[in-house]
Amino acid sequence: MTASERYSRQISLPGFGTSGQEKLRNSSVLLVGVGGLGSPLALYLAAAGIGRLGIMDDDRVSLSNLQRQVLFDSADQGMPKVEVAKRRLNALNPEVEVITYFERLRLENAEARAAGYDLLIGATDNFESRVLLNDIAVRSGKPFVHGSISEFEGQVSVFYAAEGPCYRCLYPEPKAAINQGAPLGVLGALPGIVGSVQALEAVKWLVRGSFRDSILEPLIGKLWLIDGTTMDTRTLILRPRAGCRCRSQV
Ligand SMILES: [Zn+2]
């Protein structure tokens, strides 16, 4: 009874029920990046009762993180983010198995790390790791929940090559490191919004088939954009790009 009480407010959603909760409990997610986007993501995924949550980040908590990375406290400075996150997430929901990877996503480790997870989430601040995650997702036939921010703008999409385009369809040319100097500014609430949208998309994906299909429309083939200066949001239709490598692998 305790377990269902914890999740009672989502179980009572029309169509979600105990079968939706069971789906979450049997699901696994790899979250790459435990920063501004990753903080709300990890918190909402753990709170929702994801069965297994892998978190990957090679960074340590610094003072300038605390303005937006709500997983961490002042006393956590200098600690590996994944370690602090695991402690916090376990305290929030001991039913979730949290696995930590205190390392950066690289070509050499990406495939091995992603193996065994149902869904991949990119919550990093760099193009390279998004492309890496995308390629692993395409090769392994898994969905990739993408989110990013740039100053006042944020975007989210779900890339799933079996049903829509991939990240390379959207960005065919490798983006050069645009910002080699000081990090771009950000107001902490924006990654909070964007990371929360990613968490919602991840949960929607994982309970697919539990809800009546007509209710849930994941952002597959769509790019959700938010402009924090005006709060205008737009959803663009994305189509697979002819010649993209994802087309030959599905
Ligand atoms: Zn593609």
Image (cartoon, rainbow, N blue to C red):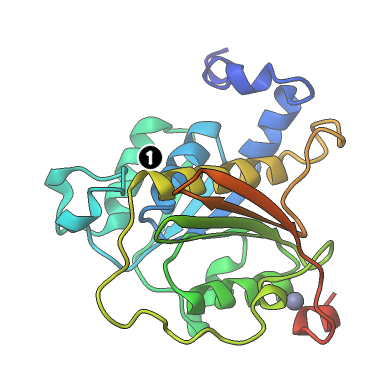
Could you tell me which residue is drawn at 50 percent across and 84 percent down?
108
| Amino acid type, callout 1 | Leu
Q: From the viewer's perspective, is residue 80 above or below residue 205? A: below
Provide residue 69's location: percent of width, then percent of height: 31, 49
Quadrant where the C terminus is found in the figure: bottom right
- Across and down, in percent, residue 125 comes to 42, 67
Residue 151: quadrant of the picture:
bottom left
Residue toward you, 36 or 85 = 36
Give 178 or 91, whichever is nearer the viewer.
178
Q: Position of residue 80 (x, y in %)?
A: 25, 59
Q: Is residue 109 left or right of residue 100?
A: right
- Indicate the quadrant of ligand 1 in the picture: bottom right
Residue receiving disc 1:
89
**Quadrant housing residue 11:** top right
Q: How busy is the neighbourhood of tag 1: few (under 14 within 10 Å), some, or many (20 plus)?
A: many
Give the side of residue 4 with respect to residue 58, left or right. right
Residue 13 vertical position relative to residue 239 in the rendered view, above or below: above
Secondary structure under the numbered disc 1 in the rendered image:
helix
In the figure, 129 relative to 215: above or below? Answer: below
Q: Residue at x 68, y 73 (%)?
A: 170
Residue sitting at 53 percent across and 69 percent down?
Answer: 113
Viewer-closest of 246 and 98: 246
